[in-house]
């Protein structure tokens, strides 16, 4: 079992950057695939990015490819989401998630979730 706490959200201007962090509890962090999702008001939660257990593989949603970068530090039990070239449509609550399986893109498939952090991008 793992508990997740996100931080780093806030207000940014279009074209700007933010870096989100997700700190995990427990000694088993390195055994989990980690992911970021987001949910805008009135919309379903959508996949953003995911990273393999050792950080060697990543995959992204088309909408954030080449703008966002997911990374992890297993020594610090933390996963990051570097968001560059932000757009107003990136405005959402961002959640980190954990699961044992790699390659998942559906929120229904992830077992553990953080409480979310708000990202607002102004035009």
Image (tube, grey):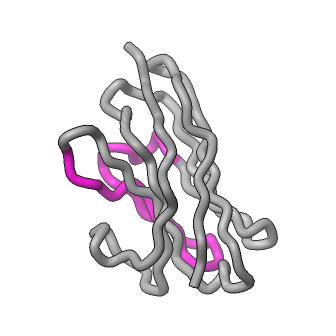
Q: What residue is rendered at 53% in x and 33% in y?
A: 84
Q: Give the main secondary structure of the magenta stretch.
A: loop
- In the image, 103: left or right of 32? left
Write down the quadrant of residue 71 in the picture.
bottom right
Look at the image and tell me in which quarter the N terminus lies: bottom right
* Residue farthest to the top, as pictured: 123
The answer to if 62 sits in the magenta stretch is yes
**122 part of magenta stretch:** no
Compared to 117, does 72 lie above or below? below
Between residue 30 and residue 26, name the one nearer to us.
Answer: 26
Q: Position of residue 17 (x, y in %)?
A: 57, 29
Residue 111 versus residue 64 in the image, above or below: below
**Looking at the image, which residue is at 44% across and 19% down?**
14
Residue drawn at x 49%, y 56% is 115
Residue 107 position (above or below residue 68): below
Q: Give the left or right position of residue 27, taking residue 70 as reference.
A: right
Residue 34, how many percent across, how many down? Answer: 52, 70
Residue 47 in the image: x percent, y percent? 33, 58
Q: Quadrant of residue 70?
A: bottom right
Screen quadrant of the C terminus: top left
Image height check: is 60 above or below 24? above
**Position in image of residue 98 (x %, y %):** 50, 73
Q: Nearer the viewer, residue 25 or 48?
A: 25
Left or right? Give the position of 102 relative to 70. Answer: left
Question: On the rendered structure, is 115 left or right of 7?
Answer: left
Figure disc tally:
0
The part of the chain drawn in magenta is 43-68
């Amino acid at each position: 079992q793992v508990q997740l706490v996100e931080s780093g959200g806030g207000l940014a201007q279009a074209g700007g950057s933010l870096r989100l962090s997700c700190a995990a509890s427990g000694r088993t962090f390195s055994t989990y695939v980690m992911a970021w999702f987001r949910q805008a008001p009135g919309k379903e939660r959508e996949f953003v990015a995911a990273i393999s257990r050792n950080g060697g593989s990543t995959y992204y949603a088309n909408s954030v490819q080449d703008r966002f970068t997911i990374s992890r530090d297993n020594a610090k039990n933390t996963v990051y989401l570097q968001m560059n070239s932000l757009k107003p449509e990136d405005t959402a609550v961002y959640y980190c998630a954990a699961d044992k399986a790699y390659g998942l893109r559906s929120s229904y498939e992830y077992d553990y979730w953080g409480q979310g952090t708000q990202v607002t991008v102004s035009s």
